[in-house]
Amino acid sequence: MHIVITGAAGFLGQRLVDQLVSAGQLAGSSLSRLTLIDQTEPPRPEAGDLATKTLALDISQPGALDDVLAEQPDVIYHFAAVVSSAAEGDLDLGMRVNFDATRDLLEGCRKHGLTRTRLIMASSVAAYGGDLPHTLDDMTALHPQNSYGAQKAMSELLINDYSRRGLVDGLVLRLPTIVIRPGRPNAAASSFASSILREPLKGEDAICPVSPDLELFIMSPATVVDALVHGAEVPGEALGAFRAFMLPGITVSVSEMLETLREVGGESALARVQFRPDPKIEAIVGSWPSRFSNLRASRLGFRSDKDFRDIVRAFMDENA
Amino acid sequence: MHIVITGAAGFLGQRLVDQLVSAGQLAGSSLSRLTLIDQTEPPRPEAGDLATKTLALDISQPGALDDVLAEQPDVIYHFAAVVSSAAEGDLDLGMRVNFDATRDLLEGCRKHGLTRTRLIMASSVAAYGGDLPHTLDDMTALHPQNSYGAQKAMSELLINDYSRRGLVDGLVLRLPTIVIRPGRPNAAASSFASSILREPLKGEDAICPVSPDLELFIMSPATVVDALVHGAEVPGEALGAFRAFMLPGITVSVSEMLETLREVGGESALARVQFRPDPKIEAIVGSWPSRFSNLRASRLGFRSDKDFRDIVRAFMDENA
Ligand SMILES: NC(=O)c1ccc[n+]([C@@H]2O[C@H](COP(=O)([O-])OP(=O)(O)OC[C@H]3O[C@@H](n4cnc5c(N)ncnc54)[C@H](O)[C@@H]3O)[C@@H](O)[C@H]2O)c1
Ligand SMILES: NC(=O)c1ccc[n+]([C@@H]2O[C@H](COP(=O)([O-])OP(=O)(O)OC[C@H]3O[C@@H](n4cnc5c(N)ncnc54)[C@H](O)[C@@H]3O)[C@@H](O)[C@H]2O)c1
């Protein structure tokens, strides 16, 4: 089994590489080749016998992936993307990387006859927006309020159409907000959601810019990686009439997150979180949906985290 | 007021031109210029003082509209499209005309600073699909099951995003099935819906390929044209978070249509309709949604036809 990953040097790409290399198989077939692509050459994993290629490619250059696709990969994970704030700041860049490159990848699959190749793209909860109902489901419209979300939604439609036409075997997973991300706070509006747990658990201070009532729809990094692996296992016939859907996150409020922090890390950890309201962040994150019901993904075997305490414990184990 | 129409030689384009020329105004401003564009030069209307330009342009050629947009039109009706069967038959052609040309038009608006130009595109009920609920509303997702619908849905997202960014003042109206179209039966799957009334009312035979229970969501040509005119009147601020929505059609079953035919045209007219089931047509048309409730368009002043009998009477008056 030959697996290609675009954006392989990124957060999810690196976690998935670790998982694939340690499992040595995907969807019941043993791995033979791994092709890792990013703007700058991704780190080469310690992968024993596995034939591993690491390539520095700008996927927004038309045909950039042509040689890779000519090798008839079995599974393609398409992660390379310009994230929301960058796509909002530069419409042309976002269109080129988030949409045109997806289209170019689909055209490459068509050209090389990759009708049975499972192409898995990561979309986002940020594709939802506008006047949303209290609880969403698989039939809730995407009315994105940011260019990143619009570009992801357009890519979803295109992957679905190419799959419907039998040109590729596509699948798009809309990811919840990922918590707890390792590393440092970053410019993402949702950065605090990891920060208010990660920093106190390391004995550092953290700022919470939103009210305790705010709810988020979240998934742990390990569960996202499980979903990405499962995405290669689900048969195309089971995917139904539209090949893009929301993954089953769990709904947690900031106050529930902090209560868990207190349970796991004690009063001293909780005391490290300072509320300092930032209306801009509250507005952005508050506009993301946090409640979904009856998701198709669950019936297709994509699992959610059990509860928030498990997420925190897993983080502590990993970072112990 | 300078109005541009792409696809102006088509069915809706021609009806809208007639309406605009006879009204002499749009959205409270008197018409000064009309630029009509199609693949082959559209007919030049009898338009008195109105400065009328008719252009043969292939809008799928990048920059084809550049000179026209440089003239800073106030309203653009974007109708040029490859219809569903053709877009299904030729993916590249559909993408080029239905999507790339829309994107190129948006880029032209951006380049020429047409931030206040109202751009109105016609989308379609064919953009809906998949496992639809019994009754749809404005928040029902677009899961198109044909390339035409996918290309329209992608164009909707792009027009919304360019509008949200203030680059143009866009609006997309999803049209119901238009009944009664004048002319001859054509290759459209919905052709029978006009045919089973139009032909008998002219004393000719017609074939009904679907069961009498089948329901359609329809709008008369006159009401569609009213909606296109109203689309130039609705203020941008009223359009809310997503600038694409379904127009308020009415739901009628084939048996209701035929009952009206009997009332208006008598038993002899009804006797001209022969049922000859065609499972392929039943499958296509039966997959289109026919029931919508609580549509935003109604609250924005877009009106629906009163009832099916009015539609038939209006057709008879027009064709008397
Ligand atoms: N992490 C999340 O919370 C989250 C949530 C929703 C969706 N997603 C999506 O999941 C995917 C992966 O997310 P991530 O958190 O790993 O992001 P990331 O930013 O860590 O990784 C993205 C990678 O794409 C690469 N890239 C960008 N432009 C490129 C180009 N032109 N050519 C080649 N490579 C390019 C970047 O260098 C980066 O390594 C993205 O598509 C993202 O939109 C992530
Ligand atoms: N009539 C309907 O029932 C209906 C329903 C839903 C949506 N629509 C949409 O409404 C719009 C108008 O529909 P219509 O019934 O008038 O269609 P039509 O086919 O009569 O008119 C479309 C026109 O576009 C022109 N065109 C196609 N490609 C072109 C190109 N590359 N450059 C320039 N012109 C080009 C054609 O020559 C044609 O005159 C279309 O966008 C259609 O998708 C129509």
Image (spheres, coloured by chain):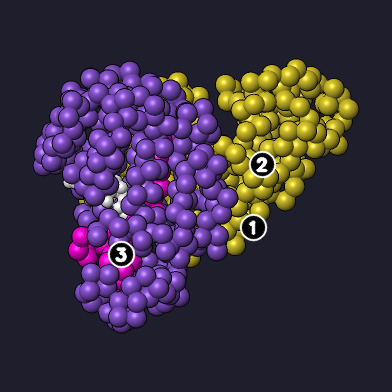
Chain colours: A purple, B yellow
Coordinates of residue B238 in the picture (x, y in percent)? 48, 65
Circle 3 — which element? helix
In the rendered view, tell whether residue B236 sits above or below residue A234: below
Indicate the quadrant containing the N terminus of chain B: top left, top right, bottom left or bottom right.
bottom left
Amino acid type at image mark 1: Asn
Asked if badges 2 and 1 are on one and the same chain, I answer yes
Q: Is residue A41 magenta?
A: no
Viewer-nearest of labels 3 and 2? Answer: 3
In the rendered view, tell whether residue B80 sits above or below residue A184: above
Left or right placement of residue B18 versus residue A313 in this view? right
Amino acid type at image mark 2: Ser
**Mark 3 neighbour density, 10 Å: few (under 14) some (14–19) many (20 or more):** many
User: Magenta segment range?
Assistant: A170-199
Camera-side residue of A64 and A296: A296
**Mark 2 neighbour density, 10 Å: few (under 14) some (14–19) many (20 or more):** many
Q: Is residue A174 magenta?
A: yes
Q: Residue at x 58, y 45 (%)?
A: B224
Q: Quadrant of residue B219?
A: top right
Q: Residue at x 22, y 25 (%)?
A: A33
Camera-side residue of A186 and A110: A186
Coordinates of residue B168 in the picture (x, y in percent)? 33, 55
Q: Which residue is mark 2?
A: B290
Q: Residue at x 67, y 48 (%)?
A: B135
Viewer-nearest of labels 1 and 3? Answer: 3
Q: Which residue is mark 3?
A: A194
Asked if badges 1 and 3 are on one and the same chain, I answer no
Q: Residue at x 78, y 33 (%)?
A: B213
Q: CA distance from mark 3 to mark 2?
A: 45 Å
Left or right placement of residue A303 versus residue B275 in this view? left
Is residue A112 something that shows in the picture? yes
Q: Which mark is residue B294?
A: 1
